[in-house]
């Protein structure tokens, strides 16, 4: 049984690392934009439940403006870090993935890499 759990966990880990590239160096945190990072994370972790007319909690996360709104004015950042009521429901995303949302918010939720303001 332990072996099965081990194999299963392995598959989950492999599955996750394959779809969402982790940001490796601290310098790159400022380059996070919706198009380059956030859209993928939302697609793999949230869209299944938060899309269209039957979106859970009536929260549709299928567009840039809706994800931005939920991040800046809604509870998105709280819920993706909420151990008791995590989003996604199956459990928190990796800390690296959650950091991507946080830094995106800190940067003012830029749409594309081109709209990210340079530091100088
Ligand atoms: C398996 C389905 C499912 C997935 C996947 C999922 N959610 Fe949810 N979400 C729900 C349900 C059901 C609710 C309403 C109940 C609740 O608040 O716990 C909800 C509520 C929320 C709320 C609160 C909305 C409000 O107005 O109170 C936020 C924010 C949220 N989800 C964000 C996300 C984000 C971001 C992701 C992906 C990282 C995600 N969810 C993935 C099902 C899901």
Image (cartoon, grey):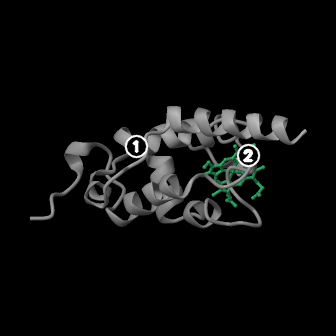
102 relative to 49, above or below = below
Q: Name the residue located 36 percent from the left edge and 39 percent from the top edge.
A: 35
| Helix, strand or loop status at disc 2 | helix
Which quadrant would residue 7 be assigned to in this image? top right
Q: Nearer the viewer, residue 72 or 81?
A: 81
Q: Position of residue 75 (x, y in %)?
A: 60, 64
Q: Position of residue 86 (x, y in %)?
A: 71, 59
Q: Is residue 101 visible?
A: yes
Q: Nearer the viewer, residue 54 or 100?
A: 100
**Numbered circle sitting on residue 63:** none
Which quadrant would residue 26 be assigned to in this image? bottom left
Q: Name the residue located 67 percent from the left edge and 54 percent from the top edge.
A: 87
2 relative to 97, above or below = above
Q: Is residue 62 visible?
A: no
Specify whether 52 is left or right of 113: right
Q: Name the residue located 54 percent from the left edge and 57 percent from the top edge.
A: 70
Identify the residue under disc 1.
37
Q: Which quadrant: the N terminus?
A: top right
Q: Name the residue located 28 percent from the left edge and 54 percent from the top edge.
A: 28
Dot placed on the residue nearer the N-terminal end, 2 or 1: 1
Specify whether 18 is left or right of 84: left
| Dot 2 and dot 1 residues touching (CB under 8 Å) | no
Q: Position of residue 82 (x, y in %)?
A: 67, 66
Residue furthest left as drawn? 120
Q: Which quadrant: the C terminus?
A: bottom left
| Helix, strand or loop status at disc 1 | helix
C-alpha gap between disc 2 and disc 1: 23 Å
Identify the residue under disc 2.
56
Q: Nearer the viewer, mark 2 or mark 1?
A: 1
């Amino acid at each position: 049984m332990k072996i099965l759990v081990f194999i299963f966990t392995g598959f989950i880990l492999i599955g996750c690392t394959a779809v969402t590239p982790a940001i490796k160096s601290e310098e790159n945190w400022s380059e996070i934009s919706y198009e380059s990072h956030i859209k993928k994370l939302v697609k793999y972790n949230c869209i299944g439940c938060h899309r269209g007319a039957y979106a859970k909690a009536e929260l549709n996360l299928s567009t840039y403006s809706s994800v931005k709104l939920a991040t800046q004015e809604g509870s998105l950042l709280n819920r993706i870090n909420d151990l008791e009521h995590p989003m996604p429901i199956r459990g928190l995303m990796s800390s690296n993935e959650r950091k991507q949302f946080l830094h995106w918010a800190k940067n003012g939720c830029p749409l594309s890499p081109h709209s990210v303001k340079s530091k100088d």
